[in-house]
Image: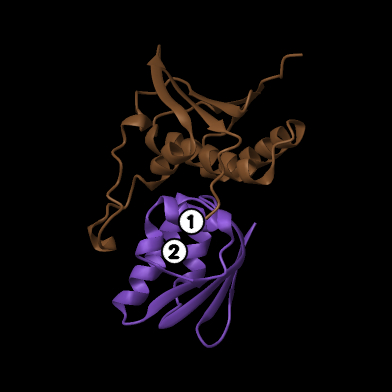
Amino acid sequence: MPVRAWVRRFPREIAALPEVFRYARDFAAENAIEAGPKHDLDLVLEELFTNLVRHNVDGVHEIEVALQAEGGSIRLTLRDFDVTPFDPTQVPTPNLNGPLEEQAAGGRGIHLVRKLTRDFHYDHREGVSVITASLPLGRRRET
Amino acid sequence: MFDIRLENDGHIAMSGRLDASQADRALQALKDVSGNVTADCTQLDYISSAGITVILELHKRLHGGGGGLRLVGMNPRVRTVFVYTGLDKVLNIE
């Protein structure tokens, strides 16, 4: 039986994050996703959602978040409608070495997404920004 | 939900989830903290890049004033966020 995709839209505001997390919690419960990958799912969702809210400042529509468990991973798709292109996959990797004073303030969130996901892609067609990424369920690295 | 408990003698205790929706509130709660500070992270369940920015702001301010910040008791998931962003090398995490 195919695993159903979850799709829901959220207000484009940082204050919507608790609702995004509740959505992820319910998705994780239905798909028996364990605490480690669930934590990473929250982290990736927050970083991508807040990136859209902050960089697509002219956007007026709600942001769509789709989740689907497939094989050993979770497929995430975020859609932002009627916005100008902003490609988060092109955000430079921050300099994480050296003194804090020499490190850029931004870029850590997308860096975390790159560390935690595979197939992190961006597309923009007919005014719609689409971000996709796969979160492996079995790669949790506890340190 | 995120909470900060300010104690005497330079100790603070953070609990819950320090995400982007809580970052401004956290900064406000920490604005008067000064000196040498130990932050108990035992009950901190989650931190994102927005939460890390709060910690970095506190770290820089305390260092700028001649003090310092020590982070103790992080659970492995929270610690991993600091490791992935390279901040375990520049912050005092025990």
Provide residue B85's location: percent of width, then percent of height.
39, 52
Task: Give the image's coloring scheme.
Answer: by chain
Residue at far top of view: A126
The disc placed on residue B55 is 2
The number of callouts visible is 2
Q: Amino acid at mark 1?
A: Gly
Query: Of B17 and A55, which appears nearest the observer?
Result: B17
**Residue beneath label 1, please?**
B51
Considering the numbered disc 1 on the image, is that residue within a helix, a strand or a loop?
Answer: helix
Which subunit holds the residue at mark 1? B
Considering the numbered disc 2 on the image, is that residue within a helix, a strand or a loop?
Answer: helix
Provide residue A11's location: percent of width, then percent of height.
57, 34
Quarter occupied by residue A1: top right
Q: On the rendered structure, is A54 left or right of A24?
A: left
**Callout 1 crowding tier (Cα within 10 Å): few <14, some 14–19, many ≥20:** many
- Marks 2 and 1, how far apart in space? 7 Å
Q: Are marks 2 and 1 on the same chain?
A: yes
Quarter occupied by residue A90: top left
Image colour for chain A is brown
Q: On the rendered structure, is A85 left or right of A81?
A: left
**Image point 54% across, 56% down: which residue?**
B78
Residue at far left of view: A102
Which subunit holds the residue at mark 2? B
The answer to whether the residues at label 2 and label 1 have Cβ atoms under 8 Å apart is yes
Q: Amino acid at mark 2?
A: Ile
Q: Is residue B18 visible?
A: no
Image colour for chain B is purple
**Image point 55% across, 52% down: which residue?**
A142
Provide residue A92's location: percent of width, then percent of height.
28, 38
**Image point 63% across, 23% down: which residue?**
A71
**Callout 2 crowding tier (Cα within 10 Å): few <14, some 14–19, many ≥20:** many
The disc placed on residue A35 is none
